[in-house]
Amino acid sequence: ALNARDAVVASTNGRIYRTNDGGATWMLEYQASDTTVFLDAIDFWDGQHGMALGDPMQGRFFLLLTRDGGDTWHEPPLD
């Protein structure tokens, strides 16, 4: 949870949901195109920047980043 109204959750099926009304409604913010993605953890270091970590795929952990409070997610470059 980011505060009393805003929270972001990662589900094991490669989806990330966000609420801005204390959990009354949830919006799907990310859905992995690869159905084998398994998300394990999500964390924010401030109200805007966070990451989601998944099981390894093709020799590296699956990683997603957000810079807008969880509205959008992207995979960082491999390098």
Image: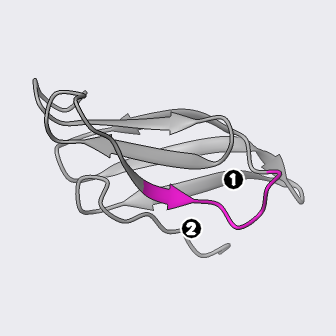
Q: Nearer the viewer, residue 68 or 15?
A: 15
User: Left of 42 or right of it: where is 55?
Assistant: right
Identify the amino acid type marked 1.
Answer: Phe
Q: How far across and how far down the image is residue 74, in percent?
A: 49, 68
Q: Which residue is mark 2?
A: 75
- Write down the residue under mark 1: 62
- Is residue 75 covered in magenta? no
User: Height in image: 1 above or below 36?
Assistant: above
Tell me, yes or no, whether the highlighted magenta stretch contains residue 34.
yes
Q: Are marks 1 and 2 in contact (CB under 8 Å)?
A: yes
Q: Residue at x 60, y 54 (%)?
A: 63
Give me the residue at 73% from left, 41% from top.
38
- CA gap, disc 1 and disc 2: 8 Å
Picture layout, residue 28 above or below residue 20 = below
Asked whether 2 or 20 is in front, the reply is: 20
Q: SS at mark 2?
A: loop
Secondary structure at badge 1 equals strand
Q: Residues within 10 Å of mark 2 (few under 14, many from 20)?
A: few
5 or 56, nearer to the observer: 5
Residue 45 position in % (x across, y down): 27, 39
Neighbours of disc 1 within 10 Å: few (<14), some (14-19), many (20+): some
The quadrant holding residue 20 is top left
Does 5 appear above or below 47?
A: above
Q: Is 77 positioned to the left or the right of 27 in the image? A: right
Of labels 1 and 2, earlier in sequence is 1
* Badge number at residue 21: none
Q: Which residues are magenta?
A: 29-36
Query: What's the amino acid at mark 2?
Result: Glu
